Amino acid sequence: MTLKDGFPRPIGDRRAHLMRVRRMAKSLGADPAAARQAGDLSHGDWADIVERCRHCPAPGQCDRWLSRHADADAAMPGCLNAVRLAKLKDGNA
């Protein structure tokens, strides 16, 4: 992913974004582990979700949103994984 000026956007720490995605999924009521066990979410799909999160331009905003939304109907506005997490929540991983 690149910025408008053409320079690459730095990506975030893999572990920090893994934890962020887990928190976002939990706040939505999605269960990635259950979806993986049921065969509805492949390891590669999960890795893609985490990798997409690593490209988020607003991880600090996400952390603040998560601290205020333990239970939410939808992901934070602008979340790069909003659609995917909504499908995961609905059982359509």
Image: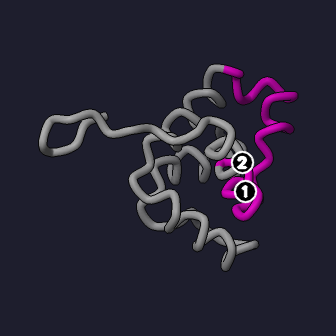
Q: Is residue 35 magenta?
A: yes
Kindly state the secondary structure of the residue where label 1 is placed: helix
- Mark 2 residue crowding within 10 angstroms, few (<14) / some (14–19) / many (20+): few
Nearest the eye: 29 or 11: 11
Image spot of residue 73 (x, y percent): 64, 70
| Residue nearest the observer in this picture, 92 or 44 | 44
The residue range painted magenta reads 21-43
Could you say where residue 35 lies in the image, as x and y percent from the top left?
79, 35
**Disc ID at residue 57:** none
> To which quarter of the image does residue 1 belong?
top left
Q: What is the basis of the colouring in this image? A: one colour
Q: Which residue is mark 2?
A: 19
Please say if 28 is above or below 13. below
Residue highlighted by disc 1: 23
Identify the image quadrant of residue 69. bottom right
The residue sitting at the bottom extreme is: 68
Q: Are marks 1 and 2 in contact (CB under 8 Å)?
A: yes
Q: Position of residue 53 (x, y in %)?
A: 52, 43
Q: Residue at x 45, y 38 (%)?
A: 11
Identify the residue at image location x=59%, y=73%: 64
79 sits left or right of 14 in the view: left
